[in-house]
Amino acid sequence: MTAALQTALFSTLEPQRFGRVAVLFGGKSAEREVSLKSGSAVLEALLSAGVDAFGIDVGEDFLQRLVSEKIDRAFIVLHGRGGEDGTMQGLLECLDIRYTGSGVLASALAMDKLRTKQVWQSLGLPTPRHAVLSSEADCISAATELGFPLIVKPAHEGSSIGMAKVTGVDELIAAWSAARTYDSQVLVEQWIEGPEFTIASLRGQVLPPIGLGTPHSFYDYDAKYLASDTQYRIPCGLDAAKEQELKALTARACEAVGVAGWARTDVMQDAEGKFWLLEVNTVPGMTDHSLVPMAARAAGLDFQQLVLAILADSVQVRG
């Protein structure tokens, strides 16, 4: 563990400092099942550390519970829309409840893959070429402009939900049609052939990158949460210079979006060794298959310490 991480973590470990903590999980997004698992793990870790914590599965009575319960701060483990997109952050700010993670603007921006790419492009940061799909004609135009293979993505979903790799126009049209059942805005992106990396950030520190490997066509929902054959490489397989380049790029990408507290950035590397930014997750998964806990362990933090470090940020940043 680095000295900076030690200082960031161990200076704020007294459970009584946090007051009464509501762990917000579940919700109504397409990532509900993952969020339930993440929330359960986070709540268990907080309780075992002696924090006065309780869980709220965000449903119809959520606002009433926020108002009626005595809540000093909220640990947000809501993945996807309604929890990771700035709406929950804005509500908590209106109620004067401190919360974990990024603020309203960064949360909303990172949840929007198109706007995130536009910000990165404006700053000269590398991200794959893309197009927005609104019709079959757009699909044909994108195929001509970008070539194949391509990957189709709902603009406001996470956990690879609604994503598909395509190698022809008919596949592209079918994938666009499927993706728009999740989101009215659909992107298609140039496929980057090469290794994938994910890099966690915690309280201003970039944690050890993880190299990902899967026999699937890409790192999809099944590979992320269900499969037993997904490969996680820590160390990530890069030489020292390239790993430092990757960490520096991640830090710049997060700064551009305005990320605070914790996050996870996904990056591809092409055959020439160039890195390409895909997206930033401001409320990453915290399940037994999740990547931020793996990176934290590589940095010397167990799961409980990681959870406390994230929660401590709500004291320092929101306090």
Image (tube, grey):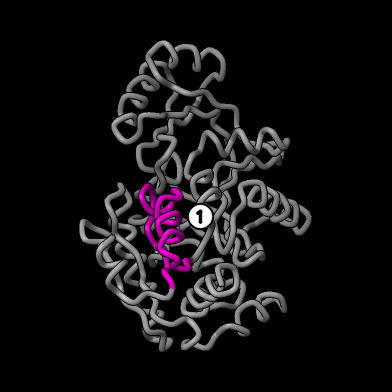
Around disc 1, counting alpha carbons within 10 Å, would you say few (fewer than 14), some (14 to 19), or many (20 or more)? many
Q: Which residue is drawn at 54% across and 44% down?
A: 279
Q: Residue at x 47, y 66 (%)?
A: 99
Instruction: Classify the position of the N terminus by image quarter.
Output: bottom right
Picture coordinates of residue 186, whole percent (x, y): 42, 29
Picture coordinates of residue 237, whole percent (x, y): 65, 57
Numbered disc 1: secondary structure: loop
Does the magenta run of residues contain 93? yes
Does the magenta run of residues contain 94? yes
Residue 293 versus residue 34 in the image, above or below: below
Q: Residue at x 35, y 27 (%)?
A: 175
In front here: 60 or 154?
60
Which residue bears the numbered disc 1? Answer: 282
Picture coordinates of residue 300, whole percent (x, y): 60, 77
Range of the magenta residues?
A: 73-99
Residue 238 versus residue 307 in the image, above or below: above
The answer to whether residue 91 is left or right of residue 204 is left
Extreme-right residue of the structure: 241
In front here: 119 or 152?
119
Picture coordinates of residue 202, whole percent (x, y): 59, 66
Residue 33 versus residue 136 in the image, above or below: below
Extreme-left residue of the structure: 60
Q: Determine which quarter of the picture holds residue 46.
A: bottom left
The answer to whether residue 168 is left or right of residue 265 is left
Q: Residue at x 31, y 24 (%)?
A: 177
Q: What residue type is labelled 1?
A: Thr
In front here: 186 or 234?
186
